[in-house]
Image (cartoon, helix red, strand yellow):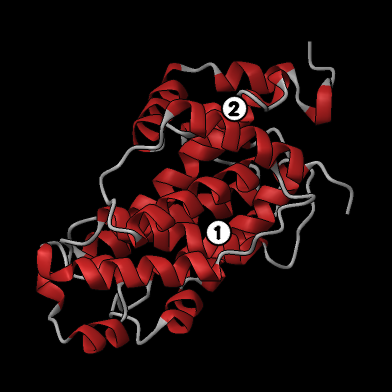
Amino acid sequence: MGSPTVSGVTSTERVAGDAPAVAAFVAKWRLREPEMVYAEVFCARPLRIRFAAWGALLFELREAAFELSDARLIEAKSAWWADELMRCAQGAPRHPLTQALAVLQLPWNGLAHGMLAMAHADGSRPVDRDAALAAIAPFAEGIATVEAALFDATMASDASRMVAVHLLCERLRVGLAASDGGRIPLSLLARHAIAGSVLAGPEGASAVADWAAELAAAQPSDVAGLALYRATRSAFDTWFLRELATGHAHRALPRLRALRMAWQAARQARRAV
């Protein structure tokens, strides 16, 4: 019953992953990132629950760190998650998603510290792209480290940068009307001579396009040896950023295109390094 199968996946993991609470969180994540369903096609079947639980957990962490309406809520919820991740390191998780992933020994403390850094961040708009990436670097590094261990993948030097680009890509896609204006930096507001309050409207389109282009340029291209999750997510992020850079902010990723992109990313990730 508890014997290991592929890559250390056990029947305990399957039971935890099949819990209704986990399924509800996974459904919430898939509503936000439906393209990741096509990535799951190329995930080994015994690892799919792990894949989905990880995606759902990242969504919850990202929401807590960036997407709540009040700075005090962001601080409180990010601090709660930091504590929960530390509890994971001690083998005592409480949340359904962390319980589903707790069948493995993972480097949770680094992610907990990254989440704690987000809890205490001032949320101010970054000066430029380098500052935007640096502000979330501890969080991104923690995610990349746990992810590599979770999927027995290479912890490449560019992995944390891919995660950081993903976080900023998502913030751009959903946060233009928020107080941080999708984290579009001050340098772009100055270049386009606009206020942050207009970013969600037609006046902000050029700044949005320029920021998407800057993030696309910052995206590492080599995914060899990375976890399938990161390789496919990076491919999708690059597509979305290029669409935003060319003014197609609301275009959905076509299904056949998503499937082909996931297949290509999966092949590249499996290359020997």
Q: Position of residue 90 (x, y in %)?
A: 65, 49
Labelled disc at residue 163: 1
Q: Position of residue 44 (x, y in %)?
A: 73, 24
Residue 247, placed above or below residue 193: above
Q: Position of residue 80 (x, y in %)?
A: 40, 54
**Quadrant into which the C terminus falls:** bottom right
Of residues 156 and 187, the one drawn nearer to the viewer in this rendering: 187
Of residues 255 and 63, the one drawn nearer to the viewer in this rendering: 255
Query: Along the polypeptide, which appears first: circle 2 or circle 1?
Result: 2
Residue 215 appears left or right of 42: left
Classify mark 2: residues with Cα within 10 Å, few (<14), some (14-19) or many (20+): many
Residue 267, placed above or below residue 247: above
Inspect the image, locate mark 2, and give the three-letter code of the amino acid beneath it: Glu
Q: Identify the secondary structure beneath mark 1.
A: helix
Of residues 260 and 70, the one drawn nearer to the viewer in this rendering: 260
* Residue 80 can be seen, yes or no: no
> Residue tagged by mark 2?
40
Q: Position of residue 229 (x, y in %)?
A: 62, 41
Inspect the image, locate mark 1, and give the three-letter code of the amino acid beneath it: Val
Q: How far apart are marks 2 and 1 (CA)?
A: 18 Å
Q: Quadrant of residue 17?
A: top right
Q: Residue lying furthest right in this view?
A: 272
Q: Identify the secondary structure beneath mark 2.
A: helix
**Quadrant into which the N terminus falls:** top right
What's the residue at 42%, 44% (across, down)?
A: 59
